[in-house]
Image: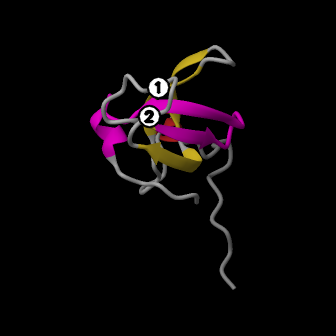
Amino acid sequence: MTAKRMPPAGRTKTRSLHAQKLPAVGQLVYLHCLNEDAAKYDVQVHPRSYHHYPKGDPKWNFVPTGFVAAFDNVSHLWYNCLYDSKKNNQDTYSQSL
């Protein structure tokens, strides 16, 4: 059994604020997403579930490469993310996690 290493007295372990905002390695991220019903725009989503709609739908048919619907586990909202608005949004995932 190994003892847990503790910081010296008077010091506490801290993590960089920048590091806390970054996703874990290999975690999928969609940028510039929106949810019009909740009036949330330009949101970064780390989806629990997502689906690519390559031809859009009646409301989103103006997007030539479709969009990704992504469920954000933190806000519990679905967001629409333009499939080709940013390079990070161009991964072709179409399954639930």
| The residue positioned farthest toward the top in the image shown | 39
- Can residue 17 be seen here? The reply is no
| The residue positioned farthest toward the front in the image shown | 58
Q: Which residues fall within the magenta stretch?
A: 68-90
Q: Which numbered dot is residue 5?
A: none
Residue bearing the label numbered 1: 60
- Residue at screen point 58% across, 58% down: 96
Q: Amino acid at mark 2?
A: Gly
> Is 80 a magenta residue?
yes
- Residue at screen point 56% across, 45% down: 47
| The residue positioned farthest toward the left in the image shown | 87
- Where residue 97 appears, as percent x and y from the top left, is 58, 60
Mark 2 residue element: loop
Residue 7 or residue 17, whichever sits in front? 17
Q: Residues within 10 Å of mark 2 (few under 14, many from 20)?
A: some
Is residue 84 toward the left or the right of residue 20 in the image? left
Residue bearing the label numbered 2: 56
Q: Looking at the image, do the residues carrying marks 2 and 1 touch, with CB atoms under 8 Å apart?
A: yes
